[in-house]
Amino acid sequence: MTTNKLTVREGELDEDEITVEIIFDDDGDDALPLYRKYPGQSEAQKAHVEINCKNETLDAACDAGVGNAVTMDEHRGHALKFECQNSLRGGEVMQLLESILPLAQRVIDGYTSELDSRGDNMVGRFTADAAAAMDEITSAIAFDAEDTDYGVWTASEFLTNDTPDGLGITSKSTNGELDAIARGLTTSAASYDPPILADPDEIASELYYWRDELAAGWKGWDHP
């Protein structure tokens, strides 16, 4: 797992004052680590930055559930989520987390766990400075979905010039082999300038379809 400590600039918190740990894991295998689009969905899942005040950690992920479900720690104020752009590449996610690390530290420094007014549950309470830091985080990671340098390509757009033969796909290709092809294609394309971004899971699903069609007798575009 990747962990990082911030090297702070003059006038910011000293390194000894930074206790928040970045736990985002960028292993380089996923060109779009925060992007997931489930089958049947017209839009991808939203993504977020999360501060876990109890564990003193900072992370980023896509929303796992469909809808507005929240965890108990979120409901009780021990974990805070801030929506971020879901089409960030791994290195960009890490840069974003590092840039808000001092703000996350202010949030955690101003956090306490106290009994609620009914005396039933422990809930998160925050100082005025912690609340101000939350507002700064929201502003720092704000984005305009319509104003980006690049978007996420659909499988049909991404594979428009590819063929089963060209990618080495046969009727006997396994899911694992097709997953590896999809990861290789999307990781390579994400390094272009400008980058071409696509969801490897969506690409893999399209390659599964090609494989299944070949097994059913389809000969592909290169054949009459």
Image (cartoon, rainbow, N blue to C red):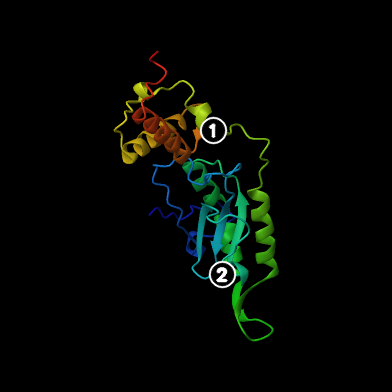
Residue named by callout 1? 154
Q: Which residue is rendered at x = 61% and y = 41% of the image? A: 42
Which secondary structure lies at badge 1?
A: loop
Q: Which residue is rendered at x = 56% and y = 66% of the image? A: 71
Please identify the residue farthest to the front as the structure is shown. 216
Q: Is residue 133 above or below residue 126?
A: above
- Most foreground residue, 69 or 139: 69
Q: Determine which of the numbered discs, if any, sits on residue 73 in the image.
A: 2
- Quadrant showing the N terminus: bottom left
Give the percent coordinates (x, y) of residue 164: 37, 24
Residue type highlighted by circle 1: Thr
Instruction: Please indicate, yes or no, whether residue 195 appears anywhere in the rendered image.
Output: no
Picture quarter containing residue 171? top left
Give the percent coordinates (x, y) of residue 188: 41, 31
Give the percent coordinates (x, y) of residue 198: 50, 35
Residue type highlighted by circle 2: Asp
Q: Is residue 158 above or below residue 29?
A: above
Q: Determine which of the numbered discs, if any, sits on residue 76 in the image.
A: none
- Most foreground residue, 8 or 97: 97
